[in-house]
Image: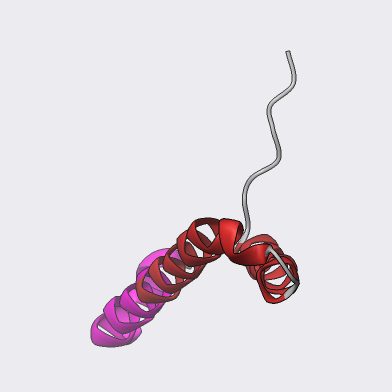
Amino acid sequence: MSHPAAITTEGIARALRDAALIVAAPGGEAYVPLFERLERELAQRARQQDAVARAKAMLGQEWKSERA
């Protein structure tokens, strides 16, 4: 049994752009919930990546020496 591909930040961003095209088209209002969900998912990914970067920065050299 194969595993599905991981969902990437880039993939979410592409889906959000596609959803924007659909929502902006006539009758696209029905897809606003999907658009908003993708916005939330992308924002959550950004918050997580920022938190990881802040944690690594806080650890500074200690983080780098332990990973080497």
Q: Position of residue 9 (x, y in %)?
A: 60, 65
Locate residue 63: give its quadrant: bottom left
Q: Position of residue 32 (x, y in %)?
A: 53, 64
Q: Position of residue 59 (x, y in %)?
A: 26, 81
State the residue at coordinates (68%, 26%): 3
Q: Is residue 55 left or right of residue 8?
A: left
State the residue at coordinates (47%, 59%): 37
Q: Is residue 21 above or below residue 15?
A: below
Q: What is the quadrant of the N terminus in the image?
A: top right
Span highlighted in magenta in the image: 48-67
Q: Would residue 56 be counted in the magenta stretch?
A: yes
Q: Is residue 56 left or right of residue 20?
A: left
Viewer-proximal residue among 3 and 31:
31
Q: Is residue 13 left or right of residue 67?
A: right
Q: Residue furthest left?
A: 58
Q: Is residue 51 left or right of residue 13?
A: left
Viewer-proximal residue among 54 and 28:
28
Q: Position of residue 14 (x, y in %)?
A: 72, 68
Q: Residue furthest top?
A: 1
Q: Residue furthest front?
A: 27
Q: Would residue 34 be counted in the magenta stretch?
A: no
State the residue at coordinates (36%, 75%): 47
State the residue at coordinates (28%, 77%): 55
Q: How many marks?
A: 0
Of helix, strand and loop, which mostly describes the magenta segment?
helix
